[in-house]
Amino acid sequence: MDFSFNKIQWDFYVMEQNMVCKKFNVEIVPLEQFAIVGLADERGDITFNALRHPQDNYSGWFLWLGKWSDGKDFFRPVHACHLMETKPQIIKYLGLPPGYRILIDDQGYEDVWFDESLLSV
């Protein structure tokens, strides 16, 4: 993978993150290209869920397609930059600050909201 090319592409996604944050009138909390996100992708489902906990040693983002599971191996760690190849439609939302939830699908549905309970996890 040529990360110099991906850096240019990532910068485009950061611009989109800025626009989304302006849309929802919040300060951007940028996601670094190599930040770790938790990803669970059930193939064939078009509904994409995401939530952001306060940052610690990772980005705070957990992303999943399909139904939620409490299984310990439900999420796998991935670098945010790998989402450019697999889940580019979600990247523009990942500058939203901790406490935000996202629900989108490939038909244009978008729901973004603040959930204060995520801040105390």
Image (cartoon, rainbow, N blue to C red):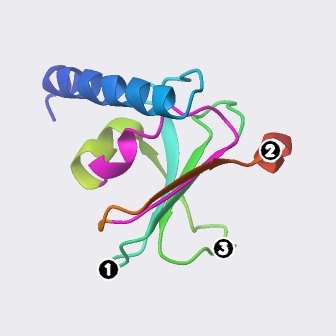
Please tell me which of labels 1 and 3 falls first in the chain. Answer: 1
Would you call the spot at circle 1 few (<14 residues within 10 Å), some (14-19), or many (20 or more)? few
Q: Amino acid at mark 2?
A: Glu
Q: CA distance from mark 1 to mark 3?
A: 20 Å
Query: Would residue 28 be visible to someone looking at this image?
Result: yes
Q: Position of residue 39 (x, y in %)?
A: 48, 56
What residue is shown with label 3? Answer: 71
- Is 84 in front, or is 28? 28
For residue 94: magenta?
yes
Residue drawn at x 62%, y 39% is 60
Comparing labels 1 and 3, the label whose residue is closer to the camera: 1
Based on the picture, tell me whether residue 33 belongs to the magenta stretch.
Answer: no
- Check contact, mark 1 vs mark 3: CB within 8 A: no
Q: Secondary structure at mark 2?
A: helix
Q: Which numbered disc, 2 or 3, marks the residue that appears first in the sequence?
A: 3
Residue linked to disc 1: 44
Q: Tell me where residue 44 sits by quadrant.
A: bottom left
**x 26%, y 43%: residue:** 84
Q: Amino acid at mark 1?
A: Gly
Splitting the image into 4 quarters, where does residue 104 fall? bottom left
- Magenta range is 87-105
Residue 105: x percent and y percent? Answer: 38, 66
The amino acid sitting under disc 3 is Gly
